[in-house]
Image: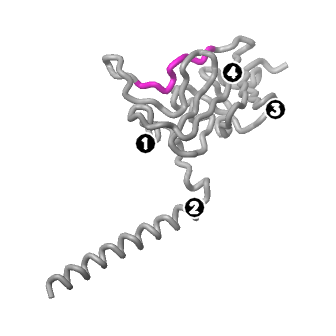
Amino acid sequence: MNNAFNSDILKTIFLSLITISALTSVYYLNMDEEEQIIENEYLKSDICYYSLNGIKSDYHYHFQLNITINDERKEIPMNIGFDFNETGELVFLHPIHTYDNSGRIHVETTKNATALLGFFFDIWEKDFTKNKILNYEIDELHLIEVKVNGEIIDTHEDTILEPYVFIDIDYRKIN
């Protein structure tokens, strides 16, 4: 009798786990892509730890970012997205990062997730909105123009990053 009782409990637990797994899968498969995007899941999230744990990134692409302020190109520093401890050891790598100061930005993740241009600026800890780039704000004399592959866009920080695009941000005087 005791063995039959234990067997029934195990069957119930097993069937409950299968049911929970199935319902969870159905829930996530039916979510809209926008519902799956966290405000900035690229800032200190679990998908950032892949390189520190030797996990190969499944999604890896680059885009080029150029920032011009009053006709002067601003350098985008190397090692944006690298967090080092006090002894200089790498302790954290954001999935959006730079290796050099060329403006080539790397996006490397273990899952396919939508990344926005504003996420890079969050990681860099610099301002970028439709009204401000770095320390420069628009006013009656200045504007911010953003181009993706030469086409003017108005999405600014909400621009979706895609492989091999060229993004130009230009802060300048109004003609």
Residue 122, given in percent of the width and then of the height, sits at: 53, 32
**Label annotation for residue 31:** 2
Tell which tag, 1 or 4, sits nearer the viewer: 1
Seen at 51% across and 34% down, the residue is 95
Vertical relation: 36 (above or below) 168: below
Given contact means CB atoms under 8 Å apart, are the residues at marks 1 and 4 in contact?
A: no
Secondary structure type for disc 2: loop
**Which amino acid type corresponds to the residue marked 1 in the rendered image?**
Asp
Please state the extent of the stretch shown in magenta in the rendering.
75-83
101 sits left or right of 144 in the view: left
* Contact between labelled residues 1 and 2, with CB atoms less than 8 Å apart: no
Amino acid type, mark 2: Met
Q: Residues within 10 Å of mark 3 (few under 14, many from 20)?
A: few
Q: Which mark is residue 46?
A: 1
Residue at the far left: name it: 2
**Place of residue 70 in the rendered image (x, y in percent of width and height, measured from the top left):** 73, 14
Q: Secondary structure at mark 3?
A: strand
Q: Kindly identify which residue carries mark 4.
A: 66
Name the residue located 48 percent from the left edge and 32 percent from the top edge.
Answer: 94
Residue bearing the label numbered 3: 151
